[in-house]
């Protein structure tokens, strides 16, 4: 019984610092601004219940390990593209980091960045 209690105590204490505690959030929205040189973009979130864009901007950093779906290169993204991104907030820098990025709908009327 003591062994089970000590294992439980260790798991409770390690919970906040373990990688399984970091959760990703899936966000749908539209690209408002894109900076390929610094590997980040600004997006407007889409409210799923009303299917409208929320006027709150979210700055997302693209990492080398970010999985791109529906495109081969980041340079293929354009402002106005509708995207789905899995993001996680870095606890040290508080920056939002993209785990995966998928283009849902390409905006054919946008200029090149």
Image (cartoon, helix red, strand yellow):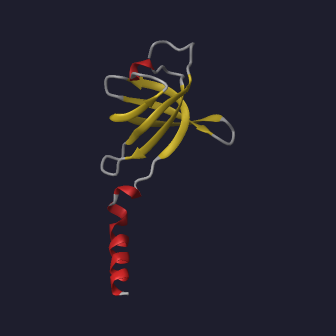
Between 19 and 112, the residue placed more toward the observer is 19
Indicate the position of residue 71 as horizontal and vertical percent values.
Answer: 46, 23
Between 17 and 52, the residue placed more toward the observer is 17
Q: Is residue 106 left or right of residue 113?
A: right
The correct choice, above or below, for 3 with respect to 12 in the image is: below
Indicate the position of residue 14 as horizontal and vertical percent values.
Answer: 33, 67
Q: Give the quadrant of residue 76.
A: top left
Q: Residue at x 53, y 40 (%)?
A: 27
Quadrant housing the N terminus? bottom left
The correct choice, above or below, for 17 with respect to 37 in the image is: below
Indicate the position of residue 17 as horizontal and vertical percent values.
Answer: 32, 61
Q: Which residue is drawn at 50% across and 27% down?
A: 31
Q: Which residue is drawn at 44% across and 42% down?
A: 87
Q: Residue at x 49, y 46 (%)?
A: 25
Quadrant housing the C terminus? top left
The correct choice, above or below, for 24 with respect to 37 in the image is: below
Between 104 and 47, the residue placed more toward the observer is 104
Q: Is residue 36 left or right of residue 81?
A: left
Number of numbered discs visible in the structure rendering: 0
Residue found at the very far bottom of the displayed protein: 1
The correct choice, above or below, for 1 with respect to 9 in the image is: below
Indicate the position of residue 57 as horizontal and vertical percent values.
Answer: 49, 36
């Amino acid at each position: 019984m003591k062994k089970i209690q000590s294992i439980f105590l260790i798991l409770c204490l390690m919970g906040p610092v373990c990688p399984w505690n970091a959760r990703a959030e899936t966000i749908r929205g539209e690209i408002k601004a894109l900076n390929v040189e610094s590997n980040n973009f600004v997006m407007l979130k889409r409210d799923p219940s009303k299917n409208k864009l929320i006027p709150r901007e979210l700055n997302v950093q693209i990492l080398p390990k970010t999985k791109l779906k529906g495109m081969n290169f980041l340079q293929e993204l354009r402002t106005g593209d509708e995207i789905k991104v899995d993001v996680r907030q870095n606890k040290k820098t508080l920056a939002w980091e993209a785990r995966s990025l998928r283009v849902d709908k390409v905006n054919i009327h946008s200029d090149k960045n």
